[in-house]
């Protein structure tokens, strides 16, 4: 039986221009990302080898490229792209759960943020 462990990147912050409204593209805002990655153990933990695990510095860079890249209307679509990309870059990921928070969502009321979560199984 193969063991699974979890790597979590919490509250990664990026400035980007996602959203449906033109003002969101023009003004931009900060987005916050959590990535919870279930990783198949392989030999990484026993051999203490970074080459056999998910290098979270590289994972952060992949997330950053997507979030700061081309504009998306839906943060749901953005979260799915992050999840599938991380699973593609790191084949040892079995599940990627990605949450994206948008603090300045254009809603007619007061709230801390809007958040979506997408879970992708590899």
Image: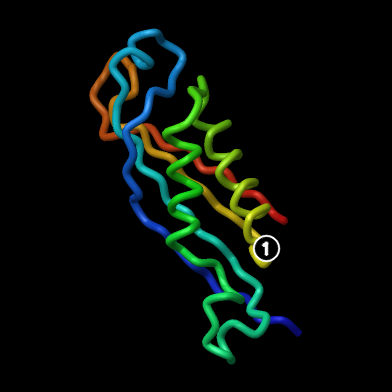
81 or 115: nearer the viewer: 81
Q: Quadrant of the C terminus?
A: bottom right
Place of residue 53 in the rendered image (x, y in percent of width and height, measured from the top left): 57, 73
Place of residue 41 in the rendered image (x, y in percent of width and height, measured from the top left): 63, 79
Place of residue 5 in the rendered image (x, y in percent of width and height, measured from the top left): 56, 75
89 versus 78 height, above or below: below
Place of residue 112 in the rendered image (x, y in percent of width and height, measured from the top left): 26, 34
Q: Residue furthest bottom?
A: 46
Say which residue appears at 31% left-offset and 22% top-offset.
Answer: 28
Say which residue appears at 49% left-offset and 67% top-offset.
Answer: 7
7 or 51: nearer the viewer: 51
Q: Left or right: 62 with respect to 28?
A: right
Residue at numbered disc 1: 94
Q: Left or right: 109 with respect to 71?
A: left
Q: Quadrant of the N terminus?
A: bottom right
104 versus 14 height, above or below: above
Helix, strand or loop for disc 1: strand
Q: Residue furthest right?
A: 1
Number of dots carrying numbers: 1
Say which residue appears at 61% left-offset and 69% top-offset.
Answer: 39
Say which residue appears at 34% left-offset and 39% top-offset.
Answer: 14
């Amino acid at each position: 039986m193969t063991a699974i462990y979890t790597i979590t990147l919490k509250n990664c912050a990026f400035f980007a221009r996602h959203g449906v409204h033109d003002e969101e593209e023009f003004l931009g805002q900060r987005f916050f990302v959590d990535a919870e990655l279930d990783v198949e153990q392989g030999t990484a933990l026993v051999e203490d080898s970074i080459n056999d695990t998910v290098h979270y510095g590289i994972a952060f860079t992949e997330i950053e490229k997507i979030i700061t890249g081309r504009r998306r209307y839906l943060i749901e679509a953005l979260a799915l792209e992050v999840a599938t990309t991380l699973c593609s870059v790191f084949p040892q990921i079995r599940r990627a759960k990605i949450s994206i928070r948008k603090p300045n969502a254009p809603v007619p009321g007061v709230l801390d943020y809007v958040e979506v979560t997408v879970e992708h199984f590899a």
